[in-house]
Image: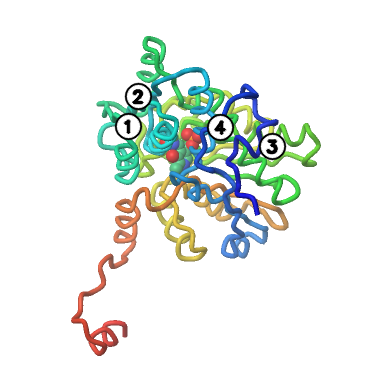
Amino acid sequence: RAQWRGVVEEYRDLLDIPADTPAVTLREGGTPLVHSEWLSGLTGAEVHLKVEGDNPTGSFKDRGMTAAISVAKHEGAQACVCASTGNTSASMAAYAAKAGLTPLVLVPEGKIAAGKMAQAIIHGAHVIMVRGNFDDCLRLARELADAYPVALVNSVNPVRLEGQKTAAFEIVDFLGDAPDYHLLPVGNAGNISAYWLGYTQYADLGRSSRRPVMRGFQAAGASPLVTGAPVADPETRATAIRIGNPASWDLAVGAAEQSGGRFAAVEDDDILSAQRELARADGVFVEPASAAGVAGLLQELKAGESYTGKTVVVTVTGHGLKDTATALEGFAEAGGTVVDEVVDADLSAVASAAG
Ligand code: F0G
């Protein structure tokens, strides 16, 4: 049986990239749609998780990055740059390594999960920490790309969204139609915009009979799309979505409006508790930001929203191993014991410890 070829080759005729672009790929995409018995039981809906942590660098960013780096390489770029809260930089560094490009990463000082930082470093990126937040880093990355011969691969580069929209294609290909609802975390707002592009393209081609209602969830301390105005000092423990002025603002608002959907804010404590519940109930360990869609679904249920009888997809965007520190902090704060006990290496000691 042939191996999955990665999203550029699997969907090439549907992507707006030059037709002769060779794919720089790590065989990203083709991620599992995992049925959630837990969330289906709570909602009376069929709830599926699109598990994007199963991508090569552990987040959905690989879909857009294979496209962006393929095109940059094809156009003769030798270096690439991005601003990042961590995952984009991890992904760019890996694809740049594969393509033989020099990666330069701008990240907000002190606000990047250790796993993501390790990925960028180990893949060979030059990592520059900026005294500022993600929004400052993105402004600087744009200015750098304007002034120097370096390709900008943030999602302001439309090729990124071309790659990322393949997640919507996969969902429709698997379910046989678009779901009724699609819920996901929102930070810089590229992903919700890309899903909407993908769902719209498939509906226009007659490959689905409808488009889903899109519901995007931001962390309460970084929820400009909910308040309607940029946030100068975004704050959340879900560092991946600690963003005050999303670059794809207009596209994301368009997706919410055209789909009859909306944005809502979820508190950090609810994000971290959704992260733990998802891990315990469904066996899916995601990073904090990635649990914002699940936290959103639980919040809507509490508020009386009904999903009964519907098909719901929730994207969980990145792997739990990216940021074990925050996960374990949340576990301890909720009363969990992080290190159980140390015993001698004999059966009776282990048996009595195990209770
Ligand atoms: N979830 C995770 C794990 C992310 O890393 C991001 C964004 C999002 C959700 C939000 O997606 O920005 O398309 O709305 N991370 C970017 C980064 C900003 O630099 O890695 P979005």
Q: Which residue lies at the image location 25% right of the left edge and 68% below the top edge?
A: 339
The amino acid on which the numbered mark 1 sits, given as a three-letter code, is Ala
Q: In this view, does 39 lie above or below 226?
A: below
Pointer 4: what residue? 23
Pointer 3: what residue? 199
Q: Do the CB atoms of the residues marked 4 and 1 lie less than 8 Å apart? A: no
**How far apart are labels 4 and 1 at the CA level?**
21 Å
Quarter of the rendered structure image containing ligand 1: top left
Q: Nearer the viewer, mark 1 or mark 3?
A: 1
Q: Is 297 left, or right, of 130 in this rendering?
A: right
Pinpoint residue 93: horizontal percent, then vertical percent.
38, 34
Q: Is residue 247 above or below residue 3?
A: above
Tag 3 or tag 2, which sits nearer the N-term?
2
Residue 119 sits in quarter: top left
Is label 4 in a helix, a strand or a loop? loop
Q: Residue 137 carries which label?
A: 2
Is label 2 in a helix, a strand or a loop? helix
Q: Residue 125 carries which label?
A: 1
Q: Closest to the observer: 43 or 212?
A: 212
Q: Is residue 115 above or below residue 276?
A: above
